[in-house]
Image (cartoon, grey):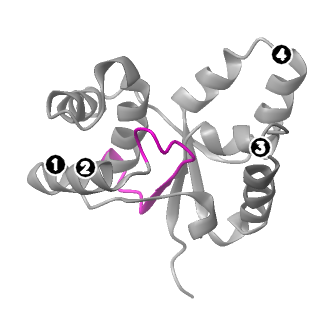
Amino acid sequence: MTKKLKIYLDTSVPNAYFDDKNPFRKEITREFWKKLKDYEVFISDIVIREIEDIGNTAKKKELLELIHDFKTLSSNENEIKALAEEYIVRRVIPLKHIEDAIHIAVASFHYLDVLISWNFEHIVKLKTKREVNVINVLLGYNQLEIIEPSMI
């Protein structure tokens, strides 16, 4: 039996599952969701917190139900905070988007294989992928594959 890949979903992925404003992204996300049984799926307390900050109670409930079976990782380790700060200091992620740096740091710290996101502004882009992996290798972490859901 082959080992399942360990994947991390940032908040943009479950959000897209219910995104009526972008039907194309919603459809891709729902197709992607059907494949999750083939992977070991992780989220973090940041994902939970970002969902709990949503004002729409019905949407919040739907999202929490959608992700309730996934393993939740803590972002409170000092090493995760230091790694996120490293991504910011080296200008991979802007300081005002520190949550994006924390998502990447959580996946890297826990040696996950893939981070999946719909965030093309700061996470799923060539510069981020390359620079995150340079930093990770320099600091003793594995390289992290950063992709969007249709690439699974």
Kindly identify which residue carries mark 1: 135
In magenta, the rendered stretch is 109-123
Name the spot of residue 26 as percent of width and height, x first. Answer: 78, 50
Q: Earlier in the sequence, mark 4 or mark 2?
A: 4
**In this rendering, the label closer to the viewer, 1 or 3:** 3
Precedes in sequence: disc 4 or disc 3: 3
Callout 1: few (<14), some (14-19), or many (20+) C-alpha neighbours within 10 Å? some
From the viewer's perspective, is residue 102 above or below residue 110? above
Secondary structure beneath label 1: helix
Q: Which residue is mark 4?
A: 56
Q: Nearer the viewer, residue 129 or 50?
A: 129
For badge 2, the amino acid type reads Val
Q: Is residue 123 above or below residue 6?
A: above
Residue 132 numbered mark, or none: 2
The amino acid at mark 4 is: Asn
Q: Residue at x 63, y 65 (%)?
A: 150
Measured Cα–Cα span from mark 1 to mark 3: 34 Å
- Proximity of marks 2 and 1: CB atoms separated by less than 8 Å: yes
| Residue name at image x 26 percent, y 60 percent | 142
